[in-house]
Image: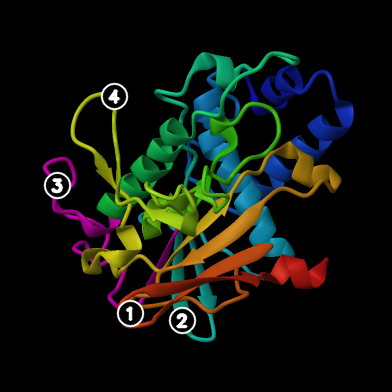
């Protein structure tokens, strides 16, 4: 099945969205912003295969609309942008809903269901880990990453772009149990908001977000959530966290945030990537102060 026929089949219920999607995909391919097999992936009946590729299409379009020209190279991360003489690589991933209850992914209207926040967070941490390994190497599966292969230079910035589209039920969702984005929970050990209660008087003595540095797994060892507090991940500059879909193409906003690594060896400028909010941590000696700042899309809105 060719691309036009496949997308027509996928979007047969909405001609407006179909036309917007097919036009953008053709533009993306014409501008050489994808691998040689991109058209085949976009035409795939497999939802996960399609979204892994279509996320790249949508994010490249967001960059272009922001006046940033992405470059796709045959070898290396998905996109390279050059800003004021600085090279910034962007690697895109759309986590699959492995381990997330079907009742959440295929939510039925009117039915009560709890948000499986830990299962979703595990998919965010896995996505970060996977793309960190592609950069850093040092594993049995990937002994040599982009840095060792001299694809990403020590002076280059590296951003992991994560689209949570496949991890939600209906509405876009990038915030976890803490009310911070999953990308913050996965990199700064931020857990649920909690009250401290004196067991004798039963009075509240304090409150704040839990320091949660591990997430339990159904099987195996717990997963750490301290990526941006760990010096070995200094080559990762930021997480570009989004939940985007076709609605962007007809003018409907979708959540987009940037979470900066305070220990990045090569940080990226604030308000560079399209986002409504940015999270920036500052070292206060014994702790980090995490601030939410307006992003470039907030200023443009």
Indicate the secondary structure of the residue bearing disc 1.
Answer: loop
> Mark 4 or 3, which is nearer the eye?
4
Which residue is tagged 1? Answer: 155
Cα–Cα gap, marks 4 and 3: 23 Å
Which residue is tagged 2? Answer: 86
Cα–Cα gap, marks 4 and 1: 39 Å
Q: Residue at x 39, y 73 (%)?
A: 288
Q: Left or right of 263: which side holds 111? A: right
Q: Residue at x 76, y 46 (%)?
A: 248
Q: Left or right of 6: which side holds 174? A: left
Q: Earlier in the sequence, mark 2 or mark 1?
A: 2
Q: Left or right of 286: which side holds 36? A: right
Indicate the secondary structure of the residue bearing disc 4.
Answer: loop
Cα–Cα gap, marks 1 and 3: 23 Å
Q: Earlier in the sequence, mark 1 or mark 3?
A: 3
Indicate the secondary structure of the residue bearing disc 3.
Answer: loop
Which residue is tagged 4? Answer: 218
Chain part drawn in magenta: 135-160
């Amino acid at each position: 099945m060719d691309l036009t026929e496949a997308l027509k089949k996928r979007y047969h219920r909405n001609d407006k969205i179909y036309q917007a999607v097919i036009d953008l995909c053709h533009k993306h391919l014409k501008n050489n912003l994808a691998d040689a097999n991109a058209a085949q992936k976009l035409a795939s009946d497999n939802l996960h295969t399609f979204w892994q590729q279509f996320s790249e299409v949508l994010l490249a379009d967001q960059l272009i609309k922001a006046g940033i020209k992405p470059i796709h190279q045959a070898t290396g991360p998905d996109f390279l942008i050059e800003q004021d003489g600085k090279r910034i690589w962007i690697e895109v991933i759309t986590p699959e809903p492995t381990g997330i209850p079907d009742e959440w992914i295929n939510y039925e209207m009117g039915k009560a269901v709890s948000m499986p926040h830990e299962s979703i967070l595990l998919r965010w941490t896995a996505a970060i880990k996977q793309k960190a390994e592609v950069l850093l190497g040092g594993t049995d599966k990937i002994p040599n990453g982009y840095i060792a292969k001299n694809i990403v230079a020590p002076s280059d910035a590296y951003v992991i772009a994560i689209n949570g589209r496949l991890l939600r039920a209906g509405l876009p969702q990038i915030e976890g149990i803490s009310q911070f984005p999953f990308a913050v929970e996965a990199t700064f050990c931020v857990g649920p908001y909690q009250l401290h209660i004196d067991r004798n008087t039963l009075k509240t003595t304090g409150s704040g977000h839990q320091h949660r540095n591990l997430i339990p797994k159904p099987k195996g060892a717990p997963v750490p959530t301290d990526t941006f507090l760990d010096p070995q991940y200094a080559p990762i500059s930021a997480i570009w966290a989004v939940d985007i879909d076709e609605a962007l193409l007809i003018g409907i906003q979708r959540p987009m945030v940037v979470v900066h690594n305070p220990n990045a060896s090569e940080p990226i400028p604030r308000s560079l990537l399209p986002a409504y909010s940015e999270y920036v941590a500052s070292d206060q000696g014994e702790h980090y102060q995490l601030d939410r700042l307006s992003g470039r899309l907030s200023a443009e809105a």
